[in-house]
């Protein structure tokens, strides 16, 4: 029985990460790793190159990259991905701190924590529609603009630590997401009238339309004044160091312009519940009534 279960395990493993003659050739002359053949790249096969590889070329035929395969390749500046690639595993390129640009092939439809901590990444392009999950681009401190052809969805992906990201664009706005003035909007049923405001957008004052019910602004150092609808339901914030005023036509939710901090009573309660000092909380949700 044990032998039978072991055979089943092997068959399942092969099915998850199929190997079809994948070859790895490293050239010390230009610190380039070339991967060719068919199948999936295994982390166990590339880990030994993590401290010396500067360039990675993945040839056509490769279909998947396993979980964490290039995690921590801190000297890698360039990666070429093939059009045959269909899957990029979780944290596959996280903490590749020298990586400058990457083009995601059209068959890759989802990324999960794939590029966290790629602090030198200045450009990431998507050939087709994409779904971003779980902090995919967090701590990409050099990324200035994010452009999607078609955004399928975002799940717990807020671009935290993207201190240079000034503009978010969705070219095809016929789906659940669209952009205006570099701000990302959602119209999907599960997140209607929601806004994600770029961390480095340089407006000192921003006026959101009356249709917007939920706003997310994460550690933006430029914003000083926010105008919202009387019907606003939620404002998600990380500390915005220069924020002085949040108001609607009929109510002030936050006022830090004078010596005495003034806040909506429910906001004050949320601060107290969090256990963090006012006026700034490391991470909070302000539920506005």
Image (cartoon, helix red, strand yellow):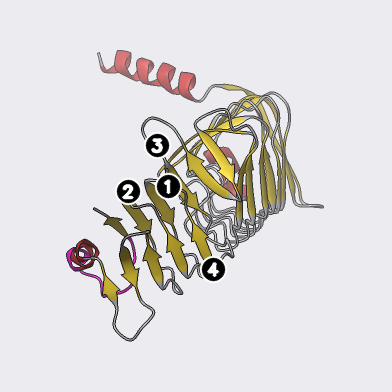
Residue nearest the observer in this picture, 241 or 64 = 241
Residue 118 lies within the magenta run:
no
Say which element carries label 4: loop
Residue nearest the observer in this picture, 133 or 276 = 276
The CA distance from mark 1 to mark 2 is 8 Å
Residue on which the image places disc 1: 210
Tell me the mark number nearer the camera, choosing from 1 and 3: 1
Say which element carries label 1: loop
The CA distance from mark 3 to mark 2 is 13 Å
Q: Are marks 1 and 2 in contact (CB under 8 Å)?
A: yes
In terms of sequence position, does the residue under pointer 3 or pointer 2 come before the other? 3
Residue 273 lies within the magenta run:
yes
Tell me the mark number nearer the camera, choosing from 4 and 1: 1
Residue on which the image places disc 4: 204
Mark number, residue 192: 3
Say which element carries label 3: loop
Disc 4 crowd rating (10 Å Cα; few below 14, some 14-19, many 20+) is: few
In terms of sequence position, does the residue under pointer 1 or pointer 2 come before the other? 1
Residue located 64% across and 57% down the image: 144
The CA distance from mark 1 to mark 3 is 13 Å
Disc 1 crowd rating (10 Å Cα; few below 14, some 14-19, many 20+) is: some
The CA distance from mark 4 to mark 2 is 23 Å
Residue located 36% across and 33% down the image: 190
Seen as rendered, the residue at the extreme bottom is 259
Disc 2 crowd rating (10 Å Cα; few below 14, some 14-19, many 20+) is: some
Q: Which residues are magenta?
A: 272-283
Tell me the mark number nearer the camera, choosing from 4 and 2: 2
Residue on which the image places disc 2: 231
Q: Position of residue 81 (x, y in %)?
A: 69, 36
Say which element carries label 2: loop
């Amino acid at each position: 029985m044990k032998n039978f279960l072991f055979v089943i395990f092997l068959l399942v493993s092969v099915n998850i990460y199929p190997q079809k003659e994948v070859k790895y050739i490293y050239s010390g002359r230009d610190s380039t790793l070339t991967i060719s053949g068919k199948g999936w790249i295994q982390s166990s096969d590339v880990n030994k190159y993590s401290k010396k590889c500067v360039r990675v070329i993945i040839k056509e035929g490769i279909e998947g990259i396993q979980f964490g395969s290039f995690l921590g390749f801190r000297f890698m500046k360039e990666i070429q991905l093939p059009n045959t690639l269909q899957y990029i595993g979780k944290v596959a390129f996280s903490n590749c701190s020298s990586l400058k640009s990457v083009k995601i092939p059209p068959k890759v439809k989802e990324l999960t924590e794939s590029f966290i901590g790629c602090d030198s990444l200045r450009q990431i392009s998507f050939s087709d529609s994409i779904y971003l999950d779980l902090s995919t681009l967090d701590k990409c401190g050099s990324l200035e603009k994010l452009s999607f052809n078609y955004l399928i969805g975002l799940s717990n992906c807020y671009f935290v630590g993207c201190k240079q990201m000034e503009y978010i664009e969705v070219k095809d706005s016929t789906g659940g997401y669209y952009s205006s003035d570099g701000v990302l909007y959602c119209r999907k049923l599960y997140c209607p009238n929601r806004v994600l405001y770029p961390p480095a957008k340089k407006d000192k004052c921003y006026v959101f339309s009356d249709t917007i019910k939920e706003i997310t602004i994460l550690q933006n150092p430029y914003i000083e004044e926010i105008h919202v609808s009387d019907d606003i339901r939620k404002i998600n914030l990380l500390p915005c160091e220069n924020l002085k005023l949040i108001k609607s036509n009929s109510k002030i939710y936050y006022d830090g312009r004078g010596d005495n901090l003034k806040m909506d009573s429910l906001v004050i309660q949320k601060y107290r519940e969090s256990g963090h000092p006012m006026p700034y909380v490391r991470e909070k949700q302000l539920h506005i009534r």
